[in-house]
Image (cartoon, helix red, strand yellow):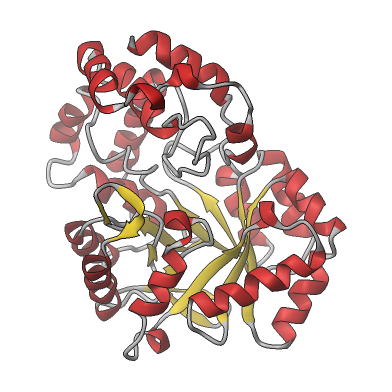
Amino acid sequence: MLYRKIKDLDISTLGFGCMRLPVIDNDQARIDEPEATRMLHYAIDNGVNYIDTAWPYHMEQSEPFIGTALKGGYRNKVHIATKLPSWMVEKHEDCDKFLNAQLEKLETEYIDFYLLHALDKQRWATLLSLDVQAFVERALKDGRIRHIGFSYHGENEDFAPIIDAYPWTFCQIQYNYMDINYQGGTEGLKYAASKDVSVVVMEPLRGGKLTSKLPPDIPELFNQCCPDQTPAQLALKWVWNHPEVATVLSGMSAMEQVEENVRLANSAVPNSLTDEESDLISKMRALYLERTKVDCTNCKYCLPCPEGVDIPSIFNLYNDLHIYDDKRWASTAYSIFIQDENKADKCTECAECEEKCPQDIPIIEDLKKAHKALT
């Protein structure tokens, strides 16, 4: 395993994201704990030392799972990152309440890397009004957290002011070859690094969309240019190619993904992307941009919908319809796999999902378009 620096700490170039762990019966709240533990231990045994979780992951079951899985000496081998659920903070005292609950869930005395979760301009302003900085200073001083950062889900122009507002150790942004101008993008990545703020990257494979069910044109491009590489390998290599990136989080849901990503991380060297690979990335980006309709990464922050609408699954099928030119398959899947009570036409336009969406997707209007296209 190769390592990069966050301050004076050696951090594995691959971080284990605990938002997409294997589950039982497709129930996000029922983590397959034996298999997930096996995967996590394999990663740690092979050098991964950055474990990322958060309050809402797996319907609030990810943190307790991590606490259990890291027993038997594994806690001392890793740095735990988790996040203050910023949208749930209504008063200053809530910050301590959530952090103390997380320490209990994780069965640890301290959090190595603590993030203010899903910041944008408005959420940051709200936290400032609740004196979140006093909470941060208090938690750092008493040792409950060791390093402070934030994850970002806002507009590009609001990223730098948040970087400048506090002496952060690190930040976390969504970054992949499709999102070079999104949530900070390349400009934000370089700005953070210039301010000595380490950057943790999430969604390097865009929720798996850059690796599975590729548009029909892309395999031919791979065969012509890089026949010995997989889409995952090239997508991760593209992110690791940036020296400003401290670690890349991968939300792995199967052991074969862990094994492949650990293997790829062993060659995660900055500035190693060839001109040929860079050209291939540019061509693939263009193909995806031509086809994708909704920029949903399947993070599931919009769930649960009060009316039961399965928003991420619907958008996935809607995008699939356009990316793969297969309306019959997408419409059939919508009819069979999305129950009537979970279809897009059950949306009552309450807008609760849009308030939660870190991608600022106009969910209500896109659900109408998706339903029309899929029926």
Q: Is residue 20 above or below residue 280?
A: below
Query: Which sits in the foreground, 192 or 25?
Result: 25
Expressed as whole percent of the image width and height from the top left, the position of residue 301 reads 52, 44
Q: Is residue 23 above or below residue 375?
A: below
Q: How many marks?
A: 0
Q: Is residue 298 left or right of residue 320?
A: right
- Dividing the picture into quarters, in which one does residue 280 lie? top left
Q: Residue at x 16, y 27 (%)?
A: 220
Q: Residue at x 39, y 77 (%)?
A: 49
Query: Which sits in the foreground, 27 or 324?
Result: 27
- Dividing the picture into quarters, in which one does residue 284 lie? top left
Decide if residue 286 is in sight here: no
Q: Is residue 49 above or below residue 181?
A: below
Decide if residue 189 is in sight here: yes
Expressed as whole percent of the image width and height from the top left, the position of residue 154 reads 65, 42
- Dividing the picture into quarters, in which one does residue 185 lie? top right
Q: Residue at x 69, y 46 (%)?
A: 120
Expressed as whole percent of the image width and height from the top left, the position of residue 190 reads 60, 53
Q: Is residue 40 left or right of residue 141?
A: left
Q: Is residue 72 left or right of residue 161?
A: left
Quadrant including the C terminus: top left
Quadrant including the N terminus: bottom left
